[in-house]
Image (tube, rainbow, N blue to C red):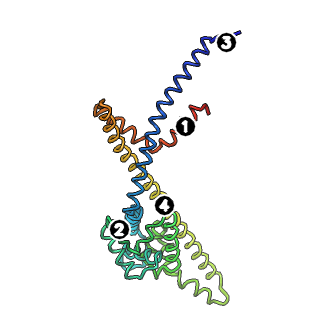
C-alpha cells in the first residue's frame, strides 16, 4: 500500500525544509563572518608583532601599579616615602640581570612617561625591559622571585620591599624590616635560647608568613586584572576591525551588483558582523551540526 502523507508528516517535512533553507542561508553568511574574523585576528596579530604591543601593555600597567601602590606603603623605618623609581629599578635588575645604572635609567624613563614605551620600541628594545616581553604568567613568576629577594633582604632593597608589603600590617612590615637580616642570626648565636628567644623566632616567622601571603595575593590580583584587561582590549580590537572590514566588503559588493544598500543598512549589518565575527568560527560548527542533524 503506497505511503500517503498525513497532515502532520507534511507539516513536519515542510518545517524541516524551511529549517534547512534557513540554515543554508545562515551558514553562507556566517562563513563570510568567519573569514572576516580570521582576517581581523591576523591583522591584530601582525600589529602586535610589529609594534610589540604586549611589552608596551605590560610596561604601562606595571609602572602604574607600582606608582599607585608604593604611596600607600606603611613602612616607617625609611627617612621618607619609598621611591617608585627605585622599586621599578630593583625589579628590572633582579629580573633581567642588567647593571644597576641601566636598570635605574630605564626605570626613570618608564616612570617619567607613565610606563609608555616608544612606538617603534620593537626595533630598538631596551634589555632592561625584557621582563615585560614575557607572557603574563612567566612575567609574574619572575617578579615574584624579585619580591622573594626583597623579603629576604629588605634593607638591601627597601623600595621594592615597601612595594611588595603594601597592604600588610604596619607592625609586621617594620618588625621584619628591622630583623630579617640580623634577628635570626643573633638568636642562632645563643647556645641555649630561652622562652623569650623562642617567642621572638615565632613572631618573626609569623610576620614573614603573613607578608608573603600579602605579596602573593597582591601579585595574583595584578595578574588576574591585567590578563582580563589584555583579553578585553584584544576582543574590542577584533570587533572594531571586523566592523571596518564588513563595512568595506558590503559597500564594495553592493556596488558591484548595482544594488547599493542604504548607508543605514550597511552600518547595521557591519556592526552585527563586527560583533559576531570573533565567534563566527564556533557558529559555523554549530550550524553544520544542525544541518547534519547532529
Distance from disc 1 to disc 3, alpha carbons, whole Å, reads 34 Å
Distance (Cα) linking label 4 and label 3:
66 Å
Q: In this rendering, which labeled residue sits more in front, label 1 or label 3?
A: 3
Foreground residue among 33 and 202: 33
In the displayed structure, would residue 12 be above or below residue 238?
above
- Position of 31 compared to 125: left or right? right
Q: Are marks 1 and 3 in contact (CB under 8 Å)?
A: no
Pointers 4 and 3 in contact (C-beta within 8 Å)? no
| Distance between the alpha carbons at the discs numbered 2 and 1 | 42 Å
As helix, strand or loop, the secondary structure at mark 1 comes to helix
The numbered dot on residue 3 is 3
Residue at 44% x, 58% y: name it.
226
Q: Residues within 10 Å of mark 1 (few under 14, many from 20)?
A: few
Q: Identify residue for label 4.
A: 223
Rendering coords of residue 114 (x, y %): 33, 66
N-term mark: 4 or 1: 4
Mark 4 vs mark 2, CA separation in Å: 23 Å
**3D distance between C-alphas at marks 3 and 2:** 75 Å
Q: Residue at x 53, y 25 (%)?
A: 19
Amino acid at each position: 500500500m503506497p505511503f500517503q502523507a498525513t497532515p502532520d508528516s507534511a507539516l513536519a517535512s515542510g518545517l524541516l525544509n524551511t529549517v534547512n533553507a534557513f540554515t543554508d542561508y545562515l551558514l553562507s553568511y556566517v562563513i563570510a563572518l568567519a573569514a572576516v574574523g580570521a582576517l581581523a585576528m591576523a591583522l591584530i596579530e601582525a600589529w602586535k608583532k610589529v609594534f610589540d604591543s604586549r611589552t608596551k601593555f605590560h610596561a604601562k600597567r606595571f609602572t602604574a601599579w607600582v606608582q599607585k601602590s608604593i604611596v600607600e606603603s606603611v613602612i616607617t623605618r625609611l627617612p621618607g616615602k619609598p621611591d617608585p623609581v627605585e622599586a621599578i629599578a630593583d625589579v628590572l635588575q633582579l629580573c633581567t640581570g642588567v647593571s644597576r645604572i641601566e636598570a635605574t635609567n630605564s626605570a626613570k624613563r618608564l616612570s617619567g612617561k607613565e610606563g609608555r614605551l616608544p612606538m617603534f620600541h620593537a626595533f630598538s628594545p631596551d634589555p632592561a625591559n625584557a621582563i615585560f616581553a614575557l607572557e603574563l604568567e612567566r612575567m609574574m613568576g619572575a617578579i615574584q622571585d624579585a619580591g622573594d629577594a626583597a623579603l629576604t633582604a629588605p634593607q638591601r632593597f627597601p623600595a621594592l620591599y615597601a612595594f611588595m608589603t603594601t597592604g600588610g600590617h604596619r607592625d609586621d612590615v617594620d618588625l621584619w624590616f628591622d630583623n630579617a637580616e640580623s634577628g635570626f642570626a643573633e638568636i642562632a648565636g645563643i647556645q641555649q635560647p630561652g622562652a623569650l628567644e623562642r617567642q621572638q623566632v615565632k613572631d618573626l616567622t609569623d610576620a614573614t608568613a603573613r607578608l608573603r601571603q600579602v605579596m602573593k595575593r597582591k601579585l595574583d590580583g595584578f595578574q588576574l586584572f591585567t590578563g582580563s584587561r589584555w583579553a578585553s582590549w584584544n576582543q574590542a580590537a577584533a570587533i572594531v576591525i571586523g566592523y571596518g572590514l564588513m563595512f568595506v566588503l558590503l559597500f564594495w559588493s553592493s556596488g558591484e551588483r548595482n544594488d547599493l544598500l542604504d548607508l543605514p543598512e550597511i552600518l547595521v549589518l557591519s556592526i552585527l558582523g563586527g560583533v559576531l565575527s570573533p565567534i563566527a568560527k564556533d557558529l559555523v560548527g554549530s550550524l553544520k551540526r544542525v544541518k547534519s542533524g547532529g
